[in-house]
Image (cartoon, grey):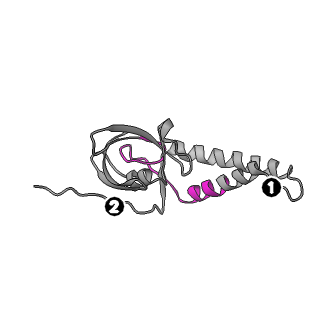
Amino acid sequence: MTELAIRQPSPPSRWPMTGEAWLSLVDELGRLRSDLASLSGDVADGVVDLEAMKAARRLDVLSGVLDAAERNHESDAVVIGRRVTILEADGESVTYALVFPGDGDPAQGWISADSPLGSAVLGCLPGDEVEVAAPAGRRVVTVVSVE
């Protein structure tokens, strides 16, 4: 009997992504900088502007992602900007788009690259099995395909 090799994810030091995702990130950062500049001009003395705070936080997070961005041209690797189909241990197959940190919404079919599942499959190839350390407990999933 052959033992299964389970890849243990580690926190990414780089954020691999498609060229299209990289361009989208650069565009969003430009919009955030512009929005933040206009929002900060409207702040009254001593009043915290929630929209400005959200924009500043998002700018900070995405700036860090861009600083560690790595454009990946391998068409079969799971990177930000691609769709990945995984097979759960119970036999259920699910497809998600891997998105920037903070953008995950599983109900929309998006998983964040910094979520437990997203970070576990980041860099995987079809056929890879990976252990996901999620709040609901550990589980093993198999990467079926990458689009």
75 drawn magenta: yes
Q: Amino acid at mark 2?
A: Gln
Mark 1 crowdedness (10 Å alpha carbons): few <14, some 14-19, many ≥20: few
Magenta extent: 59-83
Q: Going by the picture, which residue comes out furthest to the front?
A: 136
Closer to the camera: disc 2 or disc 1? 1
Decide which of 141, 27 is in the foreground and name it.
141
64 drawn magenta: yes
Give SS at disc 2: loop
Decide which of 101, 116 is in the foreground and name it.
116
Give SS at disc 1: loop
Image disc number at residue 3? none
| Residue 84 pos. (x, y %) | 39, 41
At horizontal 47% and vertical 37% (from top left) the residue drawn is: 109
At horizontal 52% and vertical 45% (from top left) the residue drawn is: 104
Relative height, residue 36 to residue 67 (above, below): above
| Residue 57 pos. (x, y %) | 67, 55
At horizontal 55% and vertical 47% (from top left) the residue drawn is: 22
Distance from Cα at disc 2 to Cα at disc 1: 42 Å
Side of 116 relative to 130 (left or right): right
Mark 2 crowdedness (10 Å alpha carbons): few <14, some 14-19, many ≥20: few
Residue marked by disc 1: 48
Decide which of 87, 75 is in the foreground and name it.
87
Q: Amino acid at mark 1?
A: Val
* Quadrant location of the N terminus in the rendered image: bottom left
Residue marked by disc 2: 8
- The answer, for residue 147, to whether it is visible in the render is no
* Quadrant location of the C terminus in the rendered image: top left
